[in-house]
Structures are given as structure tokens and as C-alpha cells.
Image: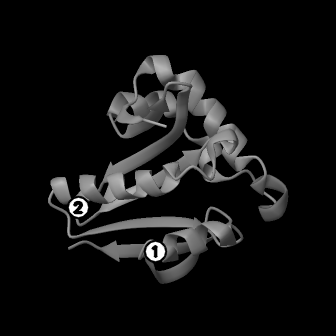
């Protein structure tokens, strides 16, 4: 199915929040806390221009939050609607993030995820991300990963 990746607008807020809620809700019980992306202020993120959406003829299917940092691009959040998972949208957004990092002149891209989100860690490893360290932040045990870009 054809899709477009574009910057999010204020009109997308409801869809963004619903996708994040549905994508992360299954992890609440597993990690014993609300995942950070569910607590984010997406109105502010959209206003900052750091949110992109993947849209098909059926509407917004996935979201991506990329935050420029001094030395690399932070892939802060990627969420695919449960109804759209398994269609390759997550992989396409990962490639888009890497392309954006290159376009902005970064030599690497980084991310972090909760250590109990093991399937996400496997996905990132499969896309060439390597674990750099683990740390506990705001009560959450996180796995930090990075990918050098060529």
C-alpha cells in the first residue's frame, strides 16, 4: 500500500496520541510503569517540528519523533498502530530516520528503549543498532543503542 511520510501538524494530534496509546499500552503491565512515550506532550512536539507521520489512504498508521542533538540525531519515539504492524512501516520509518540524520549532517543516530521491550531491542539490532550501555533513568531501566551512518 502506498504511503507518505510527512511532518505532523496540529490536525494530526488525535491520531498521534491514539497510535502511541495503542502501541505502548501492552507494555504497561510488563514493565510495571507507564512507558515514557505515553507521557509525552505531542502538542509541544508537533509545534517543535520533531514529529513525522506515516500516512496511507486509510489514515495515519505510524509516528516518528526525531530530536536533533549536538553530536547525533535522537530517535526519541517510533510507534506503529497495532492494526498496521507487520506491514514494514516501522522499518521504513527507521530508514527515514537514518536518511534524515544524514541529511542533517550527523554521522550517527541513537535511541533508547526500556530493557523489558525485548522485541524492540531485537528489531533495532536487526537494523544495525548496537547497544552502547544500560542505565536507570526516572525509575526505568533503559537500553541505549547507536548506529553509525555511512
Q: Position of residue 71 (x, y in %)?
A: 23, 66
Left or right of residue 65, residue 7 in this image: left
Place residue 83 in its image quadrant. top right
Q: Is residue 97 left or right of residue 77?
A: left
Q: Which residue is mark 1?
A: 145
Residue placed at 44% from the left, 19% from the top? 10
2 or 1: mark nearer the eye: 1
For label 1, the SS is strand
Q: What percent of the width, then of the height, locates residue 51?
A: 40, 38
Percent of width and height locating residue 4: 38, 34
Residue identified by numbered label 2: 70
Farthest residue toward the front? 1
Question: Among all residues in the image, which is located at the extreme top?
Answer: 11
The numbered dot on residue 58 is none
Q: Hey, which quadrant is residue 128 in on the image?
A: bottom left
Question: Would you place residue 22 above or below residue 60 in this image?
Answer: below
Eyeballing the image, is 146 above or below 101?
below
In the picture, measured across the screen, residue 143 lies left or right of residue 108, that is right
Q: Residue at x 43, y 35 (%)?
A: 2
Q: Quadrant of the C terminus?
A: bottom left
Near mark 1 (Cα within 10 A), the count class, few <14, some 14-19 or many ≥20, is: many
Marks 2/1: CA–CA distance: 17 Å
- Does dot 2 land on a helix, a strand or a loop? loop
| Mark sitting earlier along the chain (2/1) | 2
Amino acid at each position: 500500500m502506498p504511503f507518505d511520510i510527512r511532518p505532523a501538524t496540529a490536525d494530526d494530534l488525535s491520531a498521534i496520541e491514539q497510535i502511541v496509546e495503542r502501541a505502548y499500552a501492552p507494555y504497561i503491565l510488563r514493565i510495571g510503569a507507564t512507558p515514557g512515550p505515553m507521557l509525552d506532550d505531542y502538542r509541544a512536539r508537533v509545534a517543535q517540528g520533531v514529529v513525522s507521520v506515516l500516512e496511507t489512504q486509510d489514515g495515519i498508521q505510524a509516528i516518528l519523533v526525531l530530536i536533533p542533538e549536538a553530536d547525533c540525531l535522537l530517535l526519541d519515539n517510533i510507534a506503529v498502530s497495532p492494526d498496521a504492524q507487520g506491514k514494514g512501516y516501522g522499518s521504513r520509518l527507521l530508514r527515514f530516520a537514518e536518511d534524515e540524520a544524514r541529511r542533517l549532517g550527523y554521522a550517527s543516530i541513537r535511541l533508547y528503549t526500556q530493557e523489558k521491550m525485548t522485541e524492540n531491542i531485537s528489531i533495532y539490532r536487526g537494523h544495525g543498532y548496537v547497544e552502547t550501555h544500560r542505565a536507570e533513568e526516572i525509575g526505568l531501566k533503559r537500553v541505549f543503542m547507536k548506529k553509525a551512518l555511512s
